[in-house]
Image: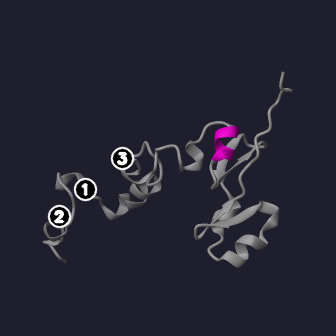
Amino acid sequence: IDLKAEENLKQFVTSPQDAHFQNVMVDELAAVLDGICEPNHVWGRHVADVSGEMLSCPTVAGKDPCNRQSHCVWYDETLSCVDSPCMKHCKQEKCVADWPSQCLWRNGACVKEEVCNYPTTEPA
């Protein structure tokens, strides 16, 4: 066991260095990692992008905001925002072949095609 691991690693992180460390029992590790992508989680707020560009799908409320996320899809049956099936494709060939999910290879990642938003009323 490297009892100096924390001391050795702290030299590589920004100040305040103690903000980057948390003692976690192995039995509690799953609870810590479960919320890593959630912006309201103790660790997720440091990892999740809350700028409005990319949000964790379950945190997006509403059909339109969900569908505007390139990695999310809205399911009317469950009234929930979930990860797009496109996200599971790591290779371009599999991505573009998944036409039922409307996948598109962009910037080295498989995302869903953009949703066109049509006006709901006729222009005056």
Q: Is residue 104 left or right of residue 53?
A: right
Q: Is residue 69 left or right of residue 5?
A: right
Numbered range of the magenta stretch? 63-68
Q: Quadrant of residue 7?
A: bottom left
Which percent across, then down, holds residue 53? 53, 48
Q: Looking at the image, can residue 22 be seen?
A: no
Residue at 43% across, 42% down: 40
Element type at mark 1:
helix
Disc 2 target residue? 10
Single out the residue that lies furthest toward the top.
Answer: 124
Q: Looking at the picture, does residue 83 appear above or below residue 1? A: above
As drawn, the label of residue 47 is none
Q: Amino acid at mark 2?
A: Lys
Single out the residue that lies furthest toward the front.
Answer: 124
Q: Amino acid at mark 1?
A: His
Q: Looking at the picture, does residue 102 appear above or below residue 51? A: below
Mark 1, Cα crowd under 10 Å, few <14 / some 14-19 / many 20+, is: few
Disc 1 target residue? 20
Disc 3 target residue? 42
Q: Is residue 21 left or right of residue 114?
A: left
What is the distance, in whole Å, between disc 1 and disc 2 at their CAs? 8 Å
Nearest the camera: 13 or 31? 13
